[in-house]
Image (cartoon, grey):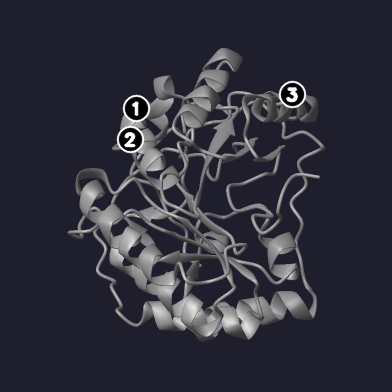
């Protein structure tokens, strides 16, 4: 895989002290890992596991799970934290929903997570591909749990939401106990958006999550990265904002700098701090909480609830 140089440069900003011992990136391996890799690559698919250099790829692929990244590997935005390459996307494939469904069936998954790059170049932001992939999956396996982690759809939000809502209406005849989760990550606190999440709007993200939470049979979900310079009070305010919009699921994890060109880690949080945030989130009424140094938005997403 070729090295990707981001369009921004934070190389003059030093990272926090040496990575602590509790952050361990598992390499993975074994037959299940190989089967997952084969299902992804044989169907010419992208995963956020690879493109975003997720530290949990080894563990998740060894468990037979992967987060499929729709709409190619090139993003129209340039977020300071993200390892996915930025540019003018040329890739678009109407057949992608079928190939994703085939890969999921080959892996025998009962729960699948779908995400995508930002495609601000498309009239619907790529919502139609999410919608058709959901329908393809439910046609093949009516009781499969599906979590779609969408962009904010920026200037096409109303149109995009309508497209996804139509797909939800089409699959609502499936068993009511089957999970449908609509996720969108706020990523960080509002004061850091200009540096960390360029091109995004905190209020726009909250608006999308509120619309997602209103859909019958759907749980809204979001995620926050920590260690970017946010205060505890700011994080708690974001959690309050999410609950006020009806979000039921939340994950909190440690930000890890993909390359020296990305936003640096300001601080590595102690595991006990993540435990404190988890308790705070549950006290606010979140039904599903994951918090820990290596937690990512799709990490163990298939689990019903925190043990």
Q: Report the Cα–Cα distance between label 2 and label 3.
A: 29 Å
Q: Report the Cα–Cα distance between label 2 and label 1.
A: 5 Å
Quadrant for residue 295, please give it.
top right
Badge 1 or badge 3: first in the primary sequence: 1
Judge by depth and name the residue closer to the eye, 97 or 257: 97
Where is residue 287 drawn, in percent x and y? 65, 39
Residue where numbered disc 3 is placed: 276
* Element type where label 3 sits in the image: helix
Residue where numbered disc 1 is placed: 194
Q: Nearer the viewer, mark 1 or mark 3?
A: 3
In this image, 275 relative to 174: left or right? right
Q: Residues within 10 Å of mark 2 (few under 14, many from 20)?
A: some
* Element type where label 2 sits in the image: loop
Task: For the residues labelled 2 and 1, say whether their Cβ atoms are less than 8 Å apart.
Answer: yes
Is residue 100 visible to us here?
no
Judge by depth and name the residue closer to the eye, 38 or 288: 288
User: On residue 198, which mark appears?
Assistant: 2
**Residue at 34% from the left image edge and 60% from the top image edge:** 164
Q: Nearer the viewer, mark 2 or mark 3?
A: 3
Residue extending farthest left: 123
Task: For the residues labelled 1 and 3, say whether their Cβ atoms are less than 8 Å apart.
Answer: no
In this image, 165 relative to 55: left or right? left
In this image, 118 relative to 181: left or right? left
Where is residue 2 drawn, in percent x and y? 47, 64
Where is residue 134 drawn, in percent x and y? 44, 70
* Element type where label 1 sits in the image: helix
**Residue at 70% from the left image edge and 62% from the top image edge:** 60
**Residue at 55% from the left image edge and 22% from the top image edge:** 235
């Amino acid at each position: 895989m070729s090295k990707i140089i981001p369009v921004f440069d934070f190389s003059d900003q030093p990272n926090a002290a040496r990575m602590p011992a509790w952050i361990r990136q598992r390499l993975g391996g074994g037959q299940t890992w190989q089967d997952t890799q084969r299902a992804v690559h044989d169907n010419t698919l992208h995963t956020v596991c690879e493109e975003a250099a997720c530290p949990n790829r080894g563990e998740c692929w060894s468990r037979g799970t992967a987060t499929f990244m729709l709409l190619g590997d090139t993003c129209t935005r340039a977020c300071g934290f993200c390892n996915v390459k930025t540019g003018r996307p040329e890739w678009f494939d109407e057949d992608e929903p079928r190939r994703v469904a085939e890969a999921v069936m080959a892996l025998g998954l009962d729960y699948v997570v779908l995400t995508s790059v930002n495609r601000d170049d498309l009239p619907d932001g790529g919502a139609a591909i999410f919608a058709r992939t959901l329908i393809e999956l439910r046609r093949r396996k009516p009781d499969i749990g599906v979590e779609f982690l969408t962009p904010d759809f920026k200037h096409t939000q109303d149109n995009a939401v309508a497209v996804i809502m139509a797909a939800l209406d089409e699959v609502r005849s499936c068993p009511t106990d089957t999970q449908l989760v609509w996720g969108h990550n706020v990523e960080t606190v509002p004061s850091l958006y200009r540096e960390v999440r360029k091109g995004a709007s905190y209020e726009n993200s909250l608006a999308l999550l509120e619309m997602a939470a209103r859909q019958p049979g759907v749980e809204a979900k979001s995620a926050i990265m920590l260690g970017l310079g946010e205060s505890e009070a700011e994080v708690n305010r974001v959690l309050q904002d999410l609950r006020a919009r009806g979000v039921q699921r939340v994950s909190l994890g440690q930000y890890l700098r993909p390359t020296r060109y990305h936003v640096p880690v300001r601080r590595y949080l102690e595991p006990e701090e993540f435990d404190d945030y988890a308790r705070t989130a549950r006290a606010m009424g979140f039904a599903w909480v994951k918090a820990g140094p290596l937690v990512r938005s799709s990490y163990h997403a298939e689990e019903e609830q925190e043990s």
